[in-house]
Image (tube, rainbow, N blue to C red):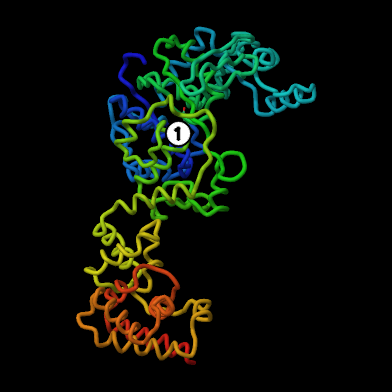
Amino acid sequence: MSSRKVRVRFAPSPTGTLHIGGVRTALYNYLFAHHHQGEFILRIEDTDQTRFVPGAEDYIMESLRWLGIEPSESPLHGGPHAPYRQSERKPLYRKYVDQLLDSGHAYYAFDTPEELDEMRQRLSAAKVASPQYNAITRHNMKNSLTLADDEVKRKLDNNEPYVVRIKLPRQEEVRFFDNIRGWIVVHTQNMDDKVLFKSDGMPTYHMANVVDDYLMQITHVIRGEEWLPSAPLHVLLYRYLGWEEQMPQFAHLPLILKPDGNGKLSKRDGDRLGFPVAPLDWKDPHTGDTTSGYREKGYFPEAVLNFLALLGWNPGTQQELFSLDELVQAFSLERVSKAGAKFDFEKAKWVNQQYLWKQSNDQLANDFGKLLQSAGIAFEPQKLPRIVALVKERSYFVNDFLTQAAFFFNDPTQYDEAILAKRWNEQSAGILSGWKNSLAATEPFLAADIELASKTYLEQAGIPIGQVLQLFRVMITGAAAGPGMFEICELLGKETVIKRLENGISHQSK
Ligand code: GLU
């Protein structure tokens, strides 16, 4: 690694929600920066104003904040290379475009959209596989390479719309080293003269991206695989601008794949299979389309970071649970794989469950209390830590407590009929009534007392507890299985237990 201080950037375009693939890119940049005591920067790439979506930038910032991977330089935090929003850097780029024009590495092109279309059709008709504006075809087009100098000048003076294109050599190998993929070699005959700048004064992604990485002294470009095809062009831009010495190292991250089948994980897969593909809920202001987020589904941010970190990177050990600090320590680009990583929703839930179990009962009770409050369910706060302790074993999310613990707050409205059909017989009503009476006489009404009273009663009546406990549970909770029955009774209180037994018996006796 070079001796420069590590500086990496996450450079999203604010065009809507942030896909979890983008979140993983941000995370790997964060981990890499902190591992090397470097800086993690957020740069907003909004040069394509047609794709701008209001609220998208705030969404990105809020996502990073929720996850706890905030940048040290950004539009919000400022920094030595401000502004960090490309639209605000507009005046900066022209100079570098002029440099490329002067050195003959770029040229003006005046072709209209119709003329470009015509060219593509002509080439398609001639069976050219991928018609492009390149070292061969540019000779038949309207540009500063084919037009006379005074004609070009006249067009520019008349403010005719133009673009500036890079002038690629016809046959040259572009080589660069990718930290994940090794050496990459691309021939310029497979590349086209990409547009770098438009007459409205806006650079395109390629130009702005390279100029800003250079000016912001970025040392490593860590981004998604979909940008790999752009990298050779970027390498040439560094060369033509005389910045090869400062060129960042590249690392193109593998795709996150659908859990089933092949191909990139999409929002549609999430909708189809019922899991979020975005960090936070989002509503597109133009289309009204909604996307659900991990935060609102009840995920802990630490769990999201943990499972995302493992999608494409592995620590080389069996360890699966990592705090952010541990990830920072363990992370390296060498252990990022080339192959796409299949998204595994069960694993994501499992990771969240591990984080749930790590929380103290008091903390969980606090979160659960807020949920109950907003659902308008009355509860006794001092009982919540014990309720949570009983139901967390079967829960993945704090939200699950609402269903897992529902019977603590409401009498059952339904009973597990399959169990009743199997277990209920002529003696059941009598046994349960007797049991109820012995509980009515139990004082104090604590789990151990309830257990003792129940066992004593059943022993005297000569009934093995295994034969009736499930019936008792269904009467009290509605369900055939759940946490320890005697503790449940203590938390419900005597009055409720008696009432539910009475209700259950009369339900069956109807
Ligand atoms: N603006 C690009 C994006 O939306 C950035 C790609 C890069 O990191 O160079 O992902």
The relative height of residue 39 versus residue 57 in the rendered view (above or below) is above
The answer to whether residue 389 is seen in the rendering is yes
Relative depth, front residue between 21 and 153: 21
Where is residue 198? Give x, y as percent: 53, 24
Q: Is residue 133 left or right of residue 53?
A: right
Residue assigned mark 1: 46
Task: Judge the density around disc 1: few (<14), some (14-19), many (≥20) Cα neighbours within 10 Å.
Answer: many
Give the residue at x 48% y 42%: 19
Give the residue at x 49% y 48%: 345
Relative depth, front residue between 337 and 273: 337
Relative depth, front residue between 39 and 207: 39
Q: Quadrant of the N terminus?
A: top left
Where is residue 343? Give x, y as percent: 51, 43
Q: Is residue 447 left or right of residue 109?
A: left
Where is residue 143? Give x, y as percent: 62, 15
Dot 1: element: loop
Kindly identify the amino acid type of the residue bearing the numbered disc 1.
Asp
Relative depth, front residue between 70 and 274: 274
